[in-house]
Amino acid sequence: MKGAWRAADIRAAEKALMAKLPEGTLMQRAAAGLARRCAGLLHDRFGGVYGRRVLVLAGSGDNGGDAMYAGAALARRGADVRVIRLSDRIHGASYKALVAAGGRPAPAPHGHLDLVVDGIVGIGGRGALRERAAAVVAEAVRARAEDGGAPVVVAVDVPSGVEVDTGDVPDPAAAVRADVTVTFGALKPAHVVGAAAVHSGLVDLVDIGLAGYLVTRPAVEVPDHSDIAGWWPSHASTDDKYTRGVVGLATGSDGYPGAALLSVAGALAGPTGYVRYAGTAQESVRERFPSVVTTDSVGAAGRAQAWVCGCGLGTDERAVGELRAVLATPVPVILDADALTLIADGSMAQPLRERRAATVITPHDREFARIAGAEPGADRVEAALRLAAQMNAVVLLKGDRTVVAAPDGSAFANPTGSAALATAGTGDVLAGLLGSLLAGGLPAPRAAVAAAYVHGLAGRLAAEKGPTTAVDVAAELREAVTLATR
Ligand SMILES: NC(=O)C1=CN([C@@H]2O[C@H](COP(=O)(O)OP(=O)(O)OC[C@H]3O[C@@H](n4cnc5c(N)ncnc54)[C@H](O)[C@@H]3O)[C@@H](O)[C@H]2O)[C@@H](O)CC1
Ligand SMILES: Nc1ncnc2c1ncn2[C@@H]1O[C@H](COP(=O)(O)OP(=O)(O)O)[C@@H](O)[C@H]1O
Ligand SMILES: [K+]
């Protein structure tokens, strides 16, 4: 798990570390790491640094300092480095070092450009780029590199123009879109959530010795393969189909039988040994998935270790009854889609409050708005955490970089996924898989994180093969599980 910390926490850690080091050490470490990454990129793309045309965009703060020291290092290796000063007040020592190394000031981008280094603002940035900076960025990225392609854009610490602490991008036209972001000490939320994560491109973390000084809890954490592999329930030789967990699905309706099939397909890819389906799509489920045991209602189904409720369930009287039955079970429950609509008017507040086992809700933004009164807004992590605390439920807030928030205040951002998942029915697949992980015994936050991770991988695998439907995503789940858990 990698943590991402907000600017104030990074500053506090930097302050504590700096107190123990000669002045300027941290900036030197940051700039050295940045120069190394830039040289590597120039090498990979153009075969070397010598003669390459580099434009440094320098703002008023230390972010510009990092960029100009790195520019100086590239100039010493023979790059043709220009710097645009975006403020009257810029970091003096690094500017002098850059000029001493042969770098030259430029009034505006001109000629071909191989590399653009965005040192406009770092963790001191607030809001969209100001007008002049935005105009210079737009002009720089319109330039052509010597090989005719677009210049490589490297953001220093964070892409300028994004909100560091939330990942919001207030004005996408006034924010840098980086190919690579070279960040220092620790990740920040902007690298992992919201539109800013997309603006960050590939994120490269340079160690400046901050680790032991970050004493606060990260704002958000990002899982990797080893977390998922470590958590995934394994089968013991003594297991039988029941001990591996039974997952129940109260999904689908006459109107939406497909949702039943997709949620069942998701559940079958999980670690449980038994999938029960309860609902009106019994026949199609049996036909398509002979291993699934079916009944027409939750009441008629046997016991399960977790229930999934709501995908394509509808919102009629029958759906209300099924939701009540699921909420009354003493086991973890996932509420998705129509179940979220049904709880939005508050009529299920009491059964929800009385639950002792975990409740997981899986809203997209509009469902979130129905329950919470407003869409998540600029700070998706904070919004999800608020709802989690209010409902005493784990919230899986869907979207690009799905956020998982738990009532204990922990939050996670999913690093996998693909825009190809933005297609009808993929949420049903996710809910089924999540149900299986809960029934398999994972604590609710981990089950939600692991399900989003594997679902995102399956989305990527499906998208690599062509236009993607939810059926394709479900079909890739087995491979995704294998990839994530080995
Ligand atoms: N503090 C430290 O110990 C270290 C800091 N480092 C670098 O220092 C950066 C932080 O430096 P600073 O605190 O000087 O702040 P920044 O360099 O991030 O920028 C702050 C300045 O940018 C201007 N600004 C803010 N929002 C703007 C906007 N939307 N458009 C245009 N200009 C805007 C403000 O006038 C402000 O003075 C980090 O991101 C990192 O790059 C690194 O050198 C590592 C060590
Ligand atoms: N732009 C996007 N980029 C990446 N993933 C997305 C994007 N939009 C949606 N998703 C993912 O696709 C799934 C869609 O689920 P949902 O909205 O419930 O659809 P449905 O109800 O049709 O199944 C979620 O897992 C969500 O995180
Ligand atoms: K920057």
Image (tube, rainbow, N blue to C red):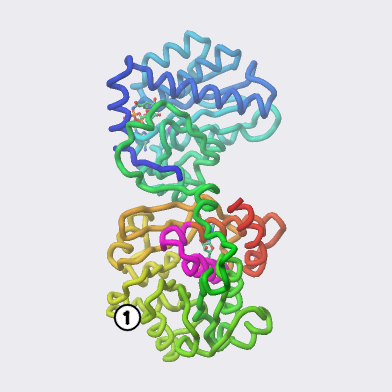
Residue at left 54%, top 67%?
433
Residue at left 41%, top 88%?
321
Identify the image quadrant of residue 61.
top left
User: In terms of secondary structure, where does tag 1 sit?
Assistant: loop
Vertical arrangement, residue 50 with respect to residue 346, above or below: above
Q: Residue furthest front?
A: 238
Residue toward you, 280 or 304: 304
Vertical arrangement, residue 211 with respect to residue 286, above or below: above
Residue 448, magenta (yes or no): yes
Residue at left 35%, top 31%?
212
Q: Main secondary structure of the magenta part?
A: helix
Residue at left 44%, top 58%?
446
Identify the image quadrant of residue 27.
top left
Question: Which amino acid type is marked by label 1?
Answer: Met
Residue toward you, 194 or 459: 459
Q: Residue furthest top?
A: 100
Relative horizontal placement of residue 84, taking residue 113 as reference (left or right): left
Report x, y in % for residue 375.
37, 63
Residue toward you, 225 or 390: 225
Which residue matches tag 1?
348
Quarter holding ligand 1: top left
Vertical arrangement, residue 92 with respect to residue 430, above or below: above
Which segment is the magenta one?
A: 424-449
